[in-house]
Amino acid sequence: MPRGEVMNSANKTKDHRGVIVPMVTPVTAQGVLDEAAVARIVDFLCVGGVHGVFVLGTTGEALATHSW
């Protein structure tokens, strides 16, 4: 799936393969999502050979994102 494409029920497959990692969610000192840092992290992971990421997966950040 190309970067930026959103997986939905129309194009979702059950054949997941490769390296899929949890990704940290970078925030600014003000607690706002740092979108530029997200892009840098995703680019870094892709260059490193990662096939997919899942956000808010295992790092406990979902509980802290109520204001986003």
Image (cartoon, helix red, strand yellow):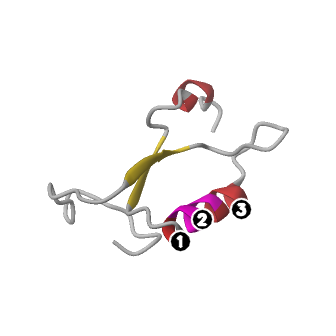
Residue 54 part of the magenta segment:
no
Above or below, 62 relative to 38:
above
- Going from the N terminus, do you reach mark 1 or mark 3 first? 3
The residue that appears at 24% across and 59% down in the rendered structure is: 17
Q: Neighbour class for label 2 at 10 Å: few (<14), some, many (≥20)?
A: few
Determine the residue located farthest toward the left in the rendered image: 14
Name the residue carrying label 3.
36
Prevailing secondary structure class for the magenta stretch in the rendered image? helix
Q: Nearer the viewer, residue 18 or 14?
A: 18
Name the residue carrying label 1.
47
**Residue 64 placement (x, y as % from top left):** 62, 27
Name the residue carrying label 2.
44
Label of residue 66 in the image: none
Query: Which amino acid, by three-letter code, is at mark 1?
Result: Val
Mark 1 falls on what kind of element? helix
Quadrant in which residue 24 is drawn: top right
**Residue 31 placement (x, y as % from top left):** 77, 36
Q: Which residues are magenta?
A: 41-45
Residue 44 part of the magenta segment:
yes
Query: Which amino acid, by three-letter code, is at mark 3?
Result: Ala
C-beta proximity under 8 Å, tags 3 and 2:
no
What is the distance, in whole Å, between disc 2 and disc 1 at their CAs?
5 Å
Q: Nearer the viewer, residue 28 or 19?
A: 19
Determine the residue located farthest toward the front in the rendered image: 48
What is the distance, in whole Å, between disc 3 and disc 2 at their CAs?
12 Å
Above or below, 30 relative to 42:
above
Mark 3 falls on what kind of element? helix
Q: Is residue 66 left or right of residue 36?
A: left
